[in-house]
Image (cartoon, helix red, strand yellow):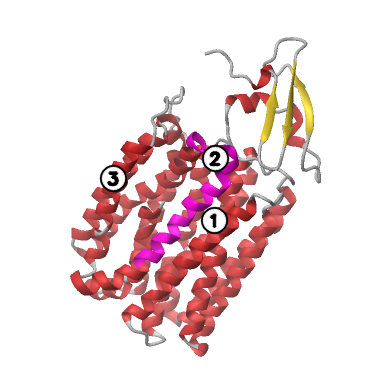
Amino acid sequence: MALPSSVLYSIGSIGPELTSAFDVSRSALGALPTTVFGTAALLSLWSGGVIVRFGARAALLALFAFAVTVFALMGVVAGHLGLAAAMALCGVCQAMSNPATNLAITENVEPAMRAAVVGRKQAAVQLSALVVGLAAPLLTHLAGWRAVFLAGAPFAAFALVVTMRSVPARPRADQRVSWRPSRPNPYLGLLMLFLAAQGSGVSAVATFVPLYGREQLGLGAGVATLSIAVLGVAGVASRLLWSRRCASLELLSPLLGMLAVGAAASGLLVWSSAWLGPVALWAGAAGVGATAVGANAVVMVLVVRDRRTGPLGPASALLSLGFFAGFVLAPMPFGAIVDGVGYGPAWLAVATAFMLAAGLTLLLVRRERPGDPLPRTDTDAERRCAPTGARSTPPGIGRWRGTSRGAGAPPGVSASCRRTPLRRECSGPAAMPRPG
């Protein structure tokens, strides 16, 4: 999760060096993350099904092998267009990261532990922000801006070796790869729109806050780049905290709404730093990390535990598409607004995007079913153990207990199922795997 995302924070950390080296505008700088996440968004239409077909281990090995090549290319290519082309290849890794890691979790982690593990792996994205924010100024000073990209290659090689040794192989799924693009149902579509609005704001903050600190507030290169580290620290803490909090909540939509409103307030803090100074800038960056970044982990917990979003692999990829769409839409228009009318209106646009996400949660609250804190398993036994009417549980009923006849059991034999806050317990023949 950390390696593909580190490219975004690298662009933000060395943005002034890139605009100077290639003599390009701020909107051209914004085109670089747009290239990465545009490619990732397009490939996310198919990546989920492909990854389910070949398994988590094969997907992770392919991701890390490709990442080694991509980081090396980004460090040696010449010109702005060459760097953009290399970053398009990085979008392949970005499209694979969420569905591959979510599938690895469902294959190797006990259901009761999955929400916490999802939070930790989502926190790795912000861990990369922390590492890049602290290391980029030093690497740039010692070896130039290209060293910031080249540093990712040995990490990818190390991850490749660890995956080969520690992630077990599983039998391939007995299905053909469908090349028809995945399509979301209405519930998943709302979650995608929410993440698109959140991603728009996060990408603008991550790409332009260091440049804003140097151009408008007169901060030094190292001090301005610390804002990325602040964003990373807050993001790591929020993804761990909110994902754990999810385990005790029946409804996650109100939490998503609260986080979106907090992100909008943080965007206004960044805007106010023109008068209040660097402290407001860092507070705003930390606020975005604590709210908008944490909301992404909450959505991932929701898709792992809620079957109504569809099969896990394609659903994870489509959620990634929504988040990536925000990264595609925001940086270039943000840079164009800055070039045209200045940073003030641009930061207000960021706050507006976060408020749009908050409005979408009002629709999610009406559709989310209360009381389903069951971690996602997608196992055959659970599918057959679930009662036929489980999807139409009346609002307000958070737990159920009942019996199901005919769900794979011999005639006259019942299988009982009981849902607890963290798992579904099944007994009887319906809970037994079918022969073969």
Q: Which mark is residue 360?
A: none
Residue 52 coordinates in the image, percent (x, y)? 45, 33
Q: Would you name the residue on which mark 2 appears?
A: 183
Up the image or down, 25 lies above or below 61; here it is below
Visible residue check, residue 149: yes
Disc 1/disc 2 C-alpha distance (Å): 20 Å
| 375, 428: nearer the viewer | 428
Please state which amino acid type lies under the numbered disc 1. Asn
Horizontal and vertical percent position of residue 26: 36, 73
Residue range (magenta) = 106-132
**Residue 206 lies in the magenta-colored region:** no
Q: Secondary structure at mark 2?
A: loop
Report the predominant secondary structure element of the magenta stretch. helix
Q: Is residue 186 left or right of residue 15?
A: right
Name the side, left or right, on which 104 lies relative to 58. Answer: right
Q: Which mark is residue 296?
A: 1
Q: Nearer the viewer, residue 166 or 184?
A: 166
Number of the label disc, if any, that sits on residue 66: 3
Image check: 152 left or right of 288? left
Q: Viewer-proximal residue, 44 or 338?
A: 44
Q: Residue at x 42, y 36 (%)?
A: 56
Question: In this orientation, does residue 335 appear?
Answer: no
State the residue at coordinates (73%, 16%).
406
Q: Earlier in the sequence, mark 3 or mark 1?
A: 3
Q: Residue at x 46, y 46 (%)?
A: 98
